[in-house]
Amino acid sequence: MVVESSENKQWDKYPTLKIIVTCYQLLIVAVMAAVGSCFVVGIGFITSENGFSAWLIAISIVGGSVTLITLYVVIEGIKLFVNITNDLHQIKNKIVDKSD
């Protein structure tokens, strides 16, 4: 999920956004690890009678899914912003070149 090398040229103008996207990607990995560990702990508590394991498993699946989707949407929004900016820059350069 790291920014691909073919996209590096368009990210050269926005190094801060590239760092933010990378941090969000690392955060996605951390959330996946946390959800996985909560799920494993919930499976470990499955023998308990108090229902704690069912809640832990349900909360980890639902909360983890919502968090992962939200983080992924933020990453794609930043990438879309960069793409729109680069496209507008190319269009502006074509218009300026034609008028000269």
Image (cartoon, rainbow, N blue to C red):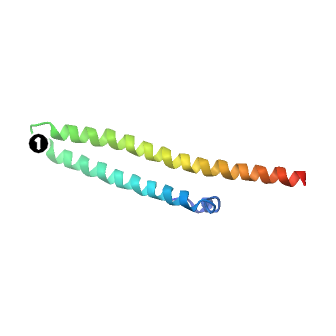
Image quarter for residue 45?
A: top left
Q: Nearer the viewer, residue 41 or 92?
A: 92
Q: Residue at x 35, y 55 (%)?
A: 30
Q: Residue furthest left?
A: 49
Disc 1 marks a residue whose amino acid type is: Thr
Between 100 and 46, the residue placed more toward the observer is 100
Name of the residue lying farthest toward the right:
100
Foreground residue, 98 or 42?
98
Residue drawn at (10%, 41%) of the image: 48
Q: Quadrant of residue 63?
A: top left
User: What residue sits right under mark 1 in the picture?
Assistant: 47
Q: Residue 40: percent from the left, percent from the top? A: 23, 49
Residue at 60%, 59% (x, y): give it. 14
Q: Is residue 96 left or right of residue 16?
A: right
SS at circle 1: helix
Q: Position of residue 98 (x, y in %)?
A: 88, 51
Left or right of residue 24: residue 83: right
- The reply, left or right, for residue 53 in relation to residue 18 is left
